[in-house]
Image (tube, coloured by chain):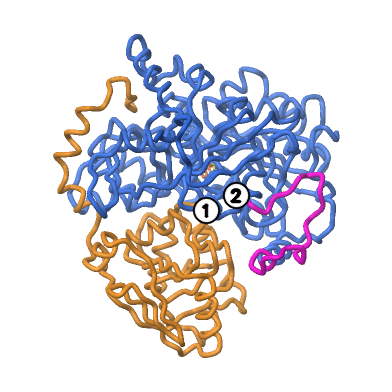
Chain colours: A blue, B orange
Amino acid sequence: MGRTLAEKVWDAHVVREAEGEPDLLYIDLHLVHEVTSPQAFEALRLAGRPVRRTDLTLATEDHNVPTTDTLLPIADPVSAAQVEALRGNCAEAGVRLFPMNDPGQGIVHVVGPQLGLSQPGMTIVCGDSHTSTHGAFGALAFGIGTSQVEHVLATQTLPQRRPRTMAVTVEGDLPPGVTAKDLILAIIARIGTGGGAGYVIEYRGAAIRGLSMEGRMTVCNMSIEAGARAGMIAPDETTFAYLAGRERVATGTDWDDAVAYWRTLGSDPDAEYDHEVVIDATTLTPYVTWGTNPGQAAPLGSPVPTPEDYADPAARASAQRALTYMGLTAGTPLSEVAVDTVFIGSCTNGRLSDLRAAAEVLRGRRVADGVRVLIVPGSMLIKAEAEAEGLDEVFEAAGAQWRSAGCSMCLGMNPDTLAPGERSASTSNRNFEGRQGQGGRTHLVSPEVAAATAVTGRLTAPADL
Amino acid sequence: MEAFTTHTGRAVPLRRSDVDTDQIIPSDWLKRIERTGFGAGLFSEWRADESFVLNNPAYAGASILLAGMDFGTGSSREHAVWALQDYGFRAVISARFADIFRGNALGNGLLPVQLAARTVERLQTAVEQDPTLEITVDLVAREVRGADVTASFELDDFTRWRLLEGLDDVGLTLRHEELVTAFERTRPAWLPTTG
Ligand code: SF4
């Protein structure tokens, strides 16, 4: 029987197999950031163990970094100490680090792909659940906890149980004005926040093939919000074109060898998945979340749902709680929900194509009175590229704030937060209670919807401007 | 890692589904660089509400969490496990766990026990009626006993053995170091390095 993409990558990395035990997998790339690594480095130090492969390890500062006044010391002493700890650990172990203000600095899941480090067929891990992003390249990429970070630092391997496979086939083409973000929100709304648990999802079908690498990263990024640890897309010409010429990508005959191998990775025609879901792309419209988990999403053109309509008691209770927290009334058209803040950024939608899409909507328009708009590029390189195209001028002319790179309001570990009761339209990936600041209310949207929302002050699709 | 064999204690019912790790330990707490002291941050936003079940004195000292479906979703933060342990929990019972949370829990000796939703519900109801009721989580027999419930749960032999012995994964893997070195010699030349 044929094998799936995930199975091929898995099989190529098994260092040790033993009856009844998890497989020991070799890890090709280990990404590190300041939040989930200090206790791992500390444990290594206590055990007197070195980092086995510093040349397969890369660190960046992202979660805590301020996005204004980045040349000043970090004001919050606890954040500053965490960033300092990463610097000390990387210097001591010999791990390459992109510190604040370095031209290579950025969000960990933006930095890997932009360097060309995330490649088809690789195993990639990071102490961060959105490591699933790198699956867009046909890599098996998943988030791990701090004890596993320690394990990978010490051994460059990880004991793992073979996951089950799920195919999400998206047939047809996305209609104009419908983005990768809308697609993934629709997929999660369909399969639920636990629907992917225990699976690696492979996204396939015409709509997926039609996405750019950036769009594919947006889709794979949010696999974890459906409970799947990893999402993958088979590499193709789009993937190879994106990789060619990047800093850490092979050249000459090594490149030829790599591409020849990558072409063998796609799932075999007779491969079987443990579970299959089919989505029709042609009927999709812009999606937004109304609740407090990413599965609580609906078309922007629909009303806030009524909890009593849910047959499942747990889903009903969860919807009720969510509406109370979000301060929403069932039946209100989502397009009438007013926001205080718009956040465009994060590892989901902080890449150059996202900023271009937002700028297209904001060009020649003004942000609505009283709405705060933060635009935070995913990396310093994207910031420079956007500025070279004059996007920063478009944003500032519209009345938006153009910031420096980092996670920022995606999780509010730096000073960019929502105040209690404040409501945002955010291009990030999590609308959990308090995610963007205690008491804050988050609606997840695409960059296009975020920009249009900035103009009207309520959840709006560009087509309705 | 602390070994887990069998544990008997009182349990607290958390009747919420989709409890994400941002709720278990909010991100403010993630700035710390230590592994201890996270118990004070456990569910800190929800604990601000007096009626939250953890604030009910009847459940003080409970060591088993009876959680709703899809517990531990979202962020990979191991701090969620450290917070539950630091607060005093030894086991969490739910009808389904998020994968990363489950892995983190097993790596630290906090036992994630998966039981049928009906069974979790029965246990929740039982401890709501009588908070002094004790529940036993028996890893040797792979069984939960309490109220009028006796339910077996699944856990593979290898993970069970590792927990019973309190063994840490790094030590186990380092016994196979020669295999890792041999594998490294087969890796293709075009694979990237971080430079
Ligand atoms: S941008 Fe948000 S989701 Fe992405 S790594 Fe940073 S905090 Fe995590």
Q: Quadrant of the N terminus of chain A?
A: top left
Could you say which disc has been placed on residue A455 in the image? none
Q: Is residue A309 magenta?
A: yes
Q: Residue at x 85, y 49 (%)?
A: A336
Q: Hey, which quadrant is residue A256 in on the image?
A: top left
Is B58 on the left-hand or right-hand side of A26? Answer: right
Provide the chain ID for the residue under circle 2.
A
| Residue matched to label 1 | B74
Q: Which amino acid lies under the numbered mark 1 shown in the image of this protein?
A: Gly
Does mark 2's beta carbon lie closer than 8 Å to ligand 1? Answer: yes
Proximity of marks 2 and 1: CB atoms separated by less than 8 Å: yes
Packing grade of label 2 (10 A; few <14, some 14-19, many >=20) is: many
Where is residue B185, by image quadrant?
Answer: top left
Q: Which residue is at a point 37% across and 34% down the rendered structure image? A: A9
Q: Which mark is residue A430?
A: 2
Direction from residue B59 to residue B189 in the image, left or right: left
Report the span colored magenta: A295-317
Mark 2 vs mark 1, CA separation in Å:
8 Å
> Residue drawn 61% across and 27% down?
A211
Furthest residue in direction top, as rendered: A252
Q: Which of A460/B11 is in front? A: B11
Residue A316: x %, y % from top left: 69, 66
Relative placement, left or right, of A426 versus A19 is: right
Residue A455 higher or lower than B78, as above or below: above
Query: Secondary structure beneath disc 2?
Result: loop
User: Toward the viewer: A136 or A201?
Assistant: A201
Up the image or down, B52 lies above or below A66; here it is below
Q: Is residue A327 above or below residue A346?
A: below
Residue A68 seen in the figure: no
